Amino acid sequence: MKTQLKIALALILTNVIMLLLLGGSIYYFLYNYSYTDFYKRLETRAKISAKYNYDANKIDAQSFKKIRDENLEKLSEEKDYNFQIKEESDLKAIAQKTSLPLSFFKEILQNAKSTLQLNDTFYTGIRYNSNDKQYLIIVSAKNYYASHHLIFMRNIILVAVFLIVIFITYLSFYFSKHIFDPIRSITDSVKQISTDNIHLRIDEKNNDNEISQLISTFNDLLNRLETAFETQKNFVSNASHEFGTPLTSIMGETEVMLMKDRSPEEYKQSLTSIMGQAERLNQITQTLLYLAQTGYSNKKVNFEILRTDELLWQTKEMIDKLNPKNNIMIDFSLLPENPLKLKIMGNKQLLYLAFTNILTNACKYSNNKPVNVSIAASDNLVFLVFKDQGIGIPESEMQFIYDPFFRGSNTRHFEGYGIGLPLSRNIIKIHNGQLLVTSVLNEGTIVQIKFPLANIQKK
C-alpha cells in the first residue's frame, strides 16, 4: 500500500510541476511579447504623427492622417503629444504640463527614444528633427490586450491546471492501484503453492512484457524446485534401500547366531557374511562421501597436464585385470596428428575414477558385449565417446540418471549402488567439461564427454 501511494504521489507531483512550468512559460512569453509589441505600435504611431505634422504639406498631412486612421487600429485612450524643444530647460515645463517624469524626456532627448509605463497607461516618445528644429513626439495609450486578454488567459490557464490536476490525481491513484493487480495475483497464486502441491503453476499470459517474463521465470524456478524435491525423494528412498539391505542382513545374521551356541565353523561363516555386508556398507559410505566432495565446487583440486589417450589405456589395463572377459575396443581412427590436441588440465586420480566408472558400467550392463571408445579433437576441445550394446535406459527414467542411488527399473539383476554416473559427472564438471548420456532401451547407451584443451595448445 505504501508503494502504491508513493507511485501515485510521484505521478501527481511530476505532472503538476510539468503543467505549471508549461502554463507559466506560455503566460510569461506572451506577457513579455505583448508589452514589446505594444511599445512598437506606439513608436510607429509617433513616427507617423511626426511625418504628417512636421515634414508633409497640408495635402500630404491629410493623406497621412487618413491612412493612419483607416489602417491603424485605434488604441484605448490613445493620445498624441508634440513639443518643440529649443533648449533643455524646456523639458521641465513639458514635464510639469504633462505630469510625466523629467527623466523620461531627458532619456528621449539623449537616446532619440524612450518608453514609460504609469499604471495602465504606456508611453512611447521619440526625438524628431525637421527643418533644423527639434521635436518630442509622445504617444500614449492603454494596453487593453495586456490588461484584459492576458488576465483572461491567466485565469483560463489556472482553471485548466486545476482541472487537469484533479484528473491526473484520479488517474494516478487508479493506475497505481491497478498496476499492481498482476503482482497481487502472482502473490496470491504463490501463497497456494507448498511442498504438498508443488506441481501447481502460475497461469502464464501470451504477452511479451515484464510481468509475463516474471511469471515464466518463477514457473521455471518451480520446475527446478520440483525436480530437486523429486531428486531428494528418490535419494532418500534409494539410499534407505541401499543402506537398509546390508544392515538388515547384519542384524538378522547376528540374531540367528545369538539364539544358541554355534560351532566354530558356523561362527566363522556368520562373521564372514557380516564382514561382507559391512564392507558393502563401507563402500557405499565412502563412495557417497566422495560424491559429496566432488559436488562441492570450492574444493581445491591439483591439476596437471594429462593426455586423454594415455588415461584411457591405463583405465583399460586396470579393467582387463578386474574383468578379463571385457570387450573394450579403443578406436584411434579419429586421433589428431597433433598430440597437443589430446592434452587437458586435470587430476589423474579423479579422471581415472570417472573413466573406470563409465567403462565398468558399459561392460556390466552389456554383459561384456563390445564397448567402443573413440577419441577426437577440435581446435579447442577433445571429445571422448563411450558406446555399448547393453540394456539401455528407459526414456521415462532418463531425467533421474544423475540422482545418487537411482537405478533403472531394468537393472535389478545387476549389482550396483547408482552412484557411479553422478560421481563421474561431478568429476567432469570439476574439469570444466560436459557429460551427455543418450540411450535407447535394449539397444545400448552412448556417453559423450568433452574437455577444453590445455592452455599449452594456444602457445
Image (cartoon, rainbow, N blue to C red):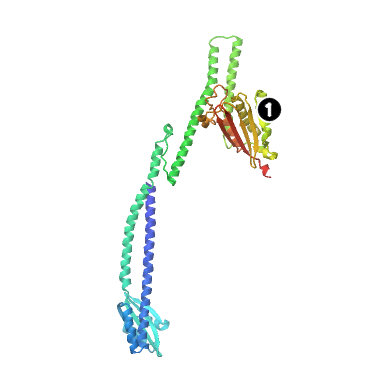
Q: In the image, what residue type sits under mark 1?
A: Glu
For residue 152, say whether it is visible: yes
Q: Nearer the viewer, residue 129 or 327?
A: 327
Q: Position of residue 36 (x, y in %)?
A: 38, 74
Report how many numbered discs are placed on residues in the image.
1
SS at mark 1 in the image: helix
Q: Position of residue 260 (x, y in %)?
A: 54, 9
Q: Please state, as top left, top right, bottom left or bottom right, where the C terminus lies in the image.
A: top right
User: Looking at the image, which residue is at 56% across and 21% down?
Assistant: 413
Taking the image as drawn, is residue 99 in sight?
Answer: no
Residue 87 at x, y percent in the picture:
39, 89
Task: Give how far across and how far down residue 63 sits, in percent.
Answer: 33, 85
Task: Name the residue rendered at 34%, 80% in the picture.
Answer: 139
Q: Residue furthest bottom?
A: 131
Residue to which mark 1 is pinned: 317
Q: Residues within 10 Å of mark 1 (few under 14, many from 20)?
A: few
Q: Nearer the viewer, residue 99 or 153?
A: 153
Q: Is residue 392 above or below residue 106?
A: above
Identify the residue at the far left of this view.
77
